[in-house]
Image: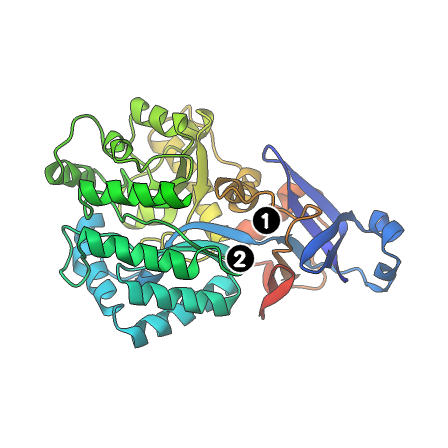
């Protein structure tokens, strides 16, 4: 049995967060046995008497719902909006990722950085090849991080070294599913990943949807990220209705769909997403860096749409989901300031909740991870205060201000299933 004593933030239902100024967490065989006030914990765990009170902070592991591992070397590089940025910077980099030596080197760095930022679960696009995606899975296995990884499906409108026939794309997916899906008791998972409708034929998207259904998998793609992208989709495909209706008609939108960006959606499109219980993944840093726009987070939230958060490297330029939660808050202010004076602002409590339990719910893993509740697997982060004399916090809002906006806390350890996968 391991005991951890300190300030504890534990997300619970309906955007609420339990706050224990002097908290205790007990972990045994990788699962949480207790999380609450230290004095209460002592009644059941006498050995915890030996644990000295500290001002370290304990929170659940952070969850990133959308990022691109092969793009990691491109952080902060390139310029322009989405489509020219892809063609001029990202596709050439992803071609380079076909080199197994380069792919392994980048993957090692990526997972190291992921752990340094407290991410214990990540949903990841590879490039389009089987070999490089297989290497990412190998490095994910070594890293200890929970992952959902998929090869980017492309058969049109990309460099010839990145596109494959529909038959080859299907074969690559099936080989990766057979080798990697639900390995290590569900720590390693495959996710079907049609990149976006601009690089996928209608036939490929339909085949991807079939594999998703046959294997009960999650599926991820991009939707309505950029206005020029939407025009490009219309020039690429012949369809009536909206971009969202195209994806829906191909079978892409369902209760296991992760739809990144979703900035430019009309009411009918929002209804389709809601009726099919699909999830939107907000990537505020990337939306600003690529000048794509500002997603109306609160508008979608008020419609009871499921919304998560992702870093979207390398449009995004930081692998920290805590930083992304800050950006989500600030973007809601921009939206109110420039686009809708009646719009609400995302709170710190909501942003933290989404980064942990909210994202876990979207992955249908909230019975396993996302909070420090008894019986869950022990994915958590230990932070040390920068200064030993750090002040006493009066409430959740005060400590979240320090955690999200300040450098007052430094990540000390990161654990998955109770095993330390990172030590500073």
The answer to whether residue 45 is seen in the rendering is yes
Q: Residue 381: image x %, image y %?
A: 61, 58
**Which picture quadrant has residue 14?**
top right
Quarter of the image containing the C terminus?
A: bottom right
Determine whether 51 is above or below 85 in the image: below
**Which picture quadrant has residue 77?**
bottom left
Q: Earlier in the sequence, mark 1 or mark 2?
A: 2
Determine whether 274 is above or below 170 in the image: above
Determine whether 55 is above or below 267 in the image: below
Q: What element carries label 1?
A: loop
Q: Do the residues labelled 1 and 2 touch (CB within 8 Å)?
A: yes
**Which picture quadrant has residue 135?**
bottom left
**CA gap, disc 1 and disc 2:** 10 Å
Q: Is mark 2 on a helix, strand or loop?
A: strand
Judging by the rendered image, the residue that carries numbered circle 1 is: 369
Judging by the rendered image, the residue that carries numbered circle 2 is: 120
Dot 1 crowding, Cα within 10 Å, few <14, some 14–19, many 20+? many
Residue shown at 57% from the left, 54% from the top: 61
Dot 2 crowding, Cα within 10 Å, few <14, some 14–19, many 20+? many
């Amino acid at each position: 049995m391991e005991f951890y004593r300190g300030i504890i933030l534990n997300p619970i239902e309906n955007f609420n967060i339990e706050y224990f100024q002097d908290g205790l967490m007990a972990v045994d065989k990788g699962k949480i046995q207790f999380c609450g006030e230290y004095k209460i914990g002592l009644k059941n765990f006498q050995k915890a008497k030996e644990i000295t009170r500290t001002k370290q902070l304990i929170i659940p592991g952070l969850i990133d719902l959308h990022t691109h591992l092969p793009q990691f070397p491109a952080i902060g590089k390139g310029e322009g909006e989405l489509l020219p940025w892809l063609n001029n910077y990202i596709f050439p980099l992803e071609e380079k990722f076909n080199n197994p030596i380069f792919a392994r080197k980048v993957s090692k760095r990526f997972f190291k950085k992921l752990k340094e930022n407290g991410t214990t679960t990540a949903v990841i696009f590879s490039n389009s090849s089987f070999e490089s995606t297989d290497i990412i899975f190998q490095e994910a296995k070594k890293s200890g991080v929970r992952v959902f990884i998929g090869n980017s499906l492309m058969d049109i409108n990309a460099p010839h070294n990145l596109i494959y026939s529909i038959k080859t794309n299907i074969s690559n997916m099936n080989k990766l599913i057979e080798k990697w899906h639900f390995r290590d008791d569900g720590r390693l998972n495959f996710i079907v990943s049609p990149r976006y409708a601009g690089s996928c034929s209608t036939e490929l998207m339909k085949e991807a949807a079939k594999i998703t259904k046959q294997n009960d998998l999650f599926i991820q793609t991009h939707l309505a990220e950029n206005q020029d992208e939407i025009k490009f989709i219309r020039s690429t495909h012949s369809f009536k209705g909206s971009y969202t209706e195209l994806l829906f008609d191909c079978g892409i939108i369902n209760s296991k769909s992760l739809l990144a960006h979703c900035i430019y959606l009309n009411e009918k499109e929002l209804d389709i997403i809601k009726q099919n219980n699909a999830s939107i993944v907000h990537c505020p840093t990337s939306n600003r860096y690529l000048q794509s726009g500002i997603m109306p987070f609160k508008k979608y939230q008020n419609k009871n749409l499921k919304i998560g958060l992702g870093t979207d490297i390398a449009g995004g330029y930081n692998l920290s989901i805590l930083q992304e939660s800050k950006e989500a808050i600030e973007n809601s202010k921009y939206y109110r300031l420039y686009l809708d004076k009646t719009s609400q602002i995302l709170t710190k409590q909501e942003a933290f909740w989404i980064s942990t339990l909210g994202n876990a719910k979207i992955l249908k893993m909230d019975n396993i991870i996302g909070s420090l509740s008894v019986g869950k697997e022990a994915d958590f982060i230990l932070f040390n205060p920068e200064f030993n004399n750090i002040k006493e916090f009066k409430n959740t809002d005060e400590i979240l201000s320090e955690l999200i906006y300040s450098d007052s806390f430094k990540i000390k350890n990161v654990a998955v299933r109770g095993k330390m996968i990172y030590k500073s």
